[in-house]
Amino acid sequence: MEIDAAPISRCSKAHEKIYQEWFSFADSDGDGRITGGDATKFFALSNLSRQELKQVWAIADSKRQGYLGFKEFVIGMQLVSLAQAGNAITVDLLDAKVDFENLEPPRMEGLDAQLAAKKKYTSKNEPEQNGSPPRQSSPAASWFQSSKSAKKVSLSSVTSIVDGLKKLYIQNLKPLEVTYRFNDFVSPLLTNSDFDAKPMVMLLGQYSTGKTTFIKHLLRRSYPGAHIGPEPTTDRFVVVMNGPDERSIPGNTVAVQADMPFSGLTTFGTAFLSKFECSQMPHPLLEHFTIVDTPGVLSGEKQRTQRSYDFTGVTSWFAAKCDLILLLFDPHKLDISDEFKRVISSLRGHDDKIRVVLNKADQVDTQQLMRVYGALMWSLGKVLNTPEVMRVYIGSFNDKPINETATGPLGKELFEKEQDDLLSDLKDIPKKACDRRINEFVKRARAAKIHAFIISHLRKEMPAMMGKAKTQQRLIDNLADEFAKVQREHHLPAGDFPSVEHFREILSGYSIDKFEKLKPKMVQAVDDMLGYDIPDLLKNFRNPYD
């Protein structure tokens, strides 16, 4: 099982040089991104119809970022070249047997004259710097260092959906989170790297269900520091990322690196960070998403008492960041222990990301597999409190050939189809990453708003002078009733409220009378962001040919 890098963006060195010159010409503001306005002017030189150019953009910007980087620009140019040769522009072209490396650049009417004029102008007015035009760095990173600089930026000036979300977070959402201590109760404040991070896939399961073997099978090789065995071998959280060379980076180092989205893990302390590491290796698949390998969930008291950190809390933190969560099961380990049940319960609110994998399925025959599948669905039904049936992939995800003596020819065909379905799910992750980021951002904004209502309500219930300690204890003891009051007062859905037990545990460490009262302007700013700013942002970066 392997995901091959799409060949369509490959081109010869000579063609790459041509495309680089074209890209610099089309990129009017020199920020390394071609947005809708620049694209419509440049692509019009191809003389293709609007419908054809709409398809070109849709395929080139498959991640729906709202702009084309150099790689996506090359894909767009190659698609234009194929369209000019009479090919229909469809997604199937990605898998077509075309020699993309030697595919001639498209014919762009009048481009050579425009390039010559630009060179003549540049030579007169601006001396070239090292033979290439200067690049402007995106200002988004500096917004997280100074809120004042963010306020000067208008939404129309951002050059991508993600940059727009960064701006909206700094201006509208972050002030609300800081005022009502959302970072202490729910989730750490977001940083620049949280927005720019690649999509993540997390593997969860009891020990020896084949999590690390699954990663090895996917990558066709082991990652640095991987250990595989029948005993609990992976004793730490390992983030497998793309990198220039093979190496392992300790958790404390990873948590303080500004370009990595793991600074929030410092809240779990040194005990956890010593059991966390980043494994880097060059791999085409890891260019598209990051994989999180986790320790096997132990049974009995060992899970709670012998781990020196909050395992369930860490799992919940990663679940919020991940785009896909794979729960792995073994046909011989179908019993969901109380500890594993707690871990699965911590994934509450992320049901849409969960996929179940019944691994090592070729160790049982067809009749036993039917019984195992039924038993697994019954066990999951008691843990996942959803009326929908969870998607289960059946297979044997390792490098050994499928055991046909146990499964028979029908079993082999089933496993191959299931592997293809799982591969399709993994291939879609990068394409859906931008949509997922918007989805998570909106979820976070709604959660922060509800949190502000809860905190301000508790503050309002506190007396001005006498009996503060008694009132605080009463509010903490009757927290579920206070949640119900907030829900009725502001007409909020009950399912969006946080866990009462978790909230009570954190609340007991604070003085409620020190909390802020409700600031309607802050809440209104978040409402305006959800109602107007985000829809406008998405409208600005939709397909320019729509």
Image (cartoon, grey):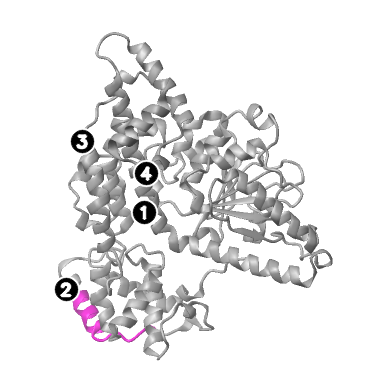
Mark 4 secondary-structure assignment: helix
Q: Is residue 18 in view?
A: no
Counting residues from the start of the chain, the first of labels 3 and 1 encountered is 1
Res. 520 mark = 3
Magenta stretch secondary structure, dominant: helix
Q: Residues within 10 Å of mark 2 (few under 14, many from 20)?
A: few
Q: Quadrant of residue 27?
A: bottom left
113 sits to left or right of 96: left
Question: Mark 1: which amino acid?
Answer: Ile
Q: Earlier in the sequence, mark 2 or mark 1?
A: 2
Instruction: Judge whether residue 387 is colored magenta.
Output: no
* Sooner in the amino-acid sequence: mark 4 or mark 2: 2
Q: Label 4 amino acid?
A: Arg
> Secondary structure beneath disc 3?
helix
**At which x and y percent is residue 409?**
78, 72
Residue ID at (36%, 46%): 192
Residue 374: give x, y in percent of width and height.
70, 55
| Image disc number at residue 438 | 1
Rounded to the nearest whole Å, what is the CA distance between mark 3 and mark 1?
A: 24 Å
Query: Could you classify mark 3 by the number of other residues whose Cα lies within 10 Å: few (under 14), some (14-19), or many (20 or more)?
Result: few
